[in-house]
Image (tube, rainbow, N blue to C red):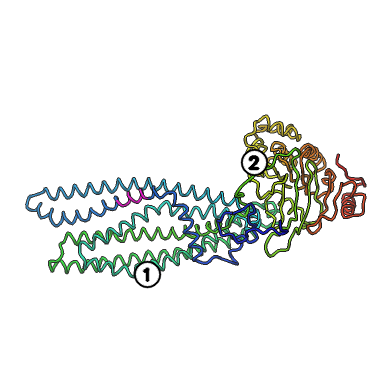
Amino acid sequence: MPEDRQRNDTAAPGSTATGPTPAPAPDVDHAAHEADGRPDDRQLRTRRNQMLRALLGPERRRLTRAVALALLENVCALVTPLLIAAAIDRGVPAAADGRWGPLTAYAALALSAGLASATLKYGFLRYSGNIAQTLLFRLRCRTFAHAVRLPLAYHESAPSGSVVARLSSDVESVEEVLEMGLDGLFSALFSMVGTVAVMLWLDLPMAAVVLALFLPLYLLTRWFRDRSRRAYRRTRGVTEQIVQHTGETYNGIRAVQAFRKEGENSARLRELDTGYATARAASGRVSAVFSGGVKLIGNLSLALLLALGAIRIADGHLEAGALTAFLLYVHRLYDPIDELASFANAFSAASAGLERIGVLFHTPDTLPEPARPRLLPAVPAPGRVRFEKVRFRYTAASPHVLDGLDLELEPGRTVALVGTTGAGKSTLAKLLARLYDPTGGRVTLDGADLCEVADAELRSGICMVTQEPFLFSGSVADNIALGRPDATRAEIAAAAEAVGAHDFISGLAEGYDTDVRKRGAGLSAGQRQLVALARVMLAAPRVLILDEATSSMDAPTERAVHAALHRVLTGRTALIIAHSLTTAAIADRVLVLENGAVVEDGPPAELATGDGPFAHLYCGWLSATGGRPHHPARH
């Protein structure tokens, strides 16, 4: 195998990996990069159209039936003016002669056509509304599913709240156009086409006047489409900034209040809101010009047709009923244009939202499932990890954090990573957890390349406990069973008992059913860490990755967590990122990293008595804590 195993960095958006080594994500396309390399209008339209095709494709049959209902409804509605014309030209003269039959028949037919039109309209709205909700459900679920599958590289570099903005405001803009769009679009288009066809059949010269006025209407529509799209893009951009700022403020509310940043953050929100109001006002002005222009052209049409119709009636080329029907059709023609204007306005907002969602979908999943996934091998002593000539860098332009690293972790042994900030400790852990893929070399677990292992299998084989364990809203039991949702209550309690968490959980108001609230705010830091360790004990992974479990804890809590750690670590391979040498002391082996390379390797007690980097770190730690010299050793 070559030292620098190349991934496919230039895979097309949405493409599927052809092998077990998917591309890294050095240059993800997301909102953070749009300011520098914003896609052009053609690319944005392409992405929007791809999104529309993906959404509408599965609904082709239902959309066809909806179109049929809209078509029938419009046919019934188009018949009514013709029946009115016939009633005026034939039914009224016959009634004047005492024959009421024709007028009654035309009135009955007009009433039947109206009832049929109303019934079909009701059916169309119910049916199209169901389609719209299905499309929204699919869009929201697909967007969320894609977002959570995006690699850690995307989420670490994307602006906070950008994905939330796409899932909320951008999807809501699509919801608005779908709620009115199917009705406004189909009915308006069919009405316009049918109306023009009947006008041409009724009287060609008068229809020519109407068609001649379509030229300024077409130019006005093109102007409106371009301006409104740009206006709504600005609106969606400012909306995302507001969501980001609000989310960052509330997520960091402790820092905001501690540093008295309330006024500054409020001023920033006012500034963003002012930008939003300006963008909305611009889109409102565009809509007002378009709607006023359509009304002007419609009124001009009526005035010209009245004049021309009077002349043609006087010449005997047109009947009064036909002129009445023509004027009704003109009114019917411009009403749908108003509906199309409202639809176009909503579609401009939805189009901007779809373009932004399309940018998210254009970001490929750089850690996809392998083409031929394999299971972790069944071996007598599971948990052997190898880093084979591993090279890694976070972006194509950045230097390598790891450059040709060779390392082996023996099964059932605890290894502590020690080093200064930026030495590569967290990078090593992320590669082992397959939150990133190496740009060269490979990482194996029991002989299997992590890039070739099925994702579900990998997540059951490797668990990671972060420095600040994340608990989800829900019960304590649900949080412990995160890695094994099918676990029984007895198994959950046994895992908690094993790490010493059962007593405090039993003392909670509702025991294992107690809601831990947002991020586990209902529990102390030590209790949250014990719940996280119980989660690991229940999942029983081959490999455990631990990011300093006792950081910022008081001495009694730290001792409790260390006792739990001893139980969790027994018999399994563990990689611990040790920020304090108290944690390193419980390891079987210590690796000291500098600039992505291992500069010292050995048991902690042995290294502490030497004259290497670990001994210097150890002495510095003793001086800082005022502790007495002793040799760290696993108890």
Q: How many marks?
A: 2
Q: Is residue 273 above or below residue 571?
A: below
Task: Find out whether residue 251 is within the magenta segment.
Answer: no
Q: Are the residues at dot 1 and dot 2 in contact (C-beta closer than 8 Å)?
A: no
Location of the C terminus (image quadrant): top right
Between 134 and 21, the one lying in front of the other is 21
Mark-to-mark CA distance, 1 and 2: 57 Å
Residue stretch in magenta: 64-71
Give percent across and percent down for residue 468.
72, 47
Label 1: how many Cα within 10 Å (few below 14, some 14–19, many 20+): few
Q: Amino acid at mark 2?
A: Arg
Please name the residue shown 27% across and 52% down the image: 75
Q: Amino acid at mark 1?
A: Leu
Task: Pick out the residue farthest to the top.
Answer: 490
Image x and y of residue 329, in percent: 25, 59
Residue 67 is a magenta residue: yes
Q: Which residue is depicted at the point 30% across and 57% down?
A: 191
Quadrant of residue 258 in the image?
bottom right
Residue named by callout 2: 517
Circle nearer the viewer, 1 or 2 = 1
Sequence-wise, which precedes: disc 1 or disc 2? 1
Residue 472 picture location, percent across and down: 64, 42
Residue linked to disc 1: 219
On the image, which quarter does residue 238 sit in?
A: bottom right
Between 341 and 24, the residue placed more toward the observer is 24
Residue 551 in sight from this viewpoint = no
SS label for mark 1: helix
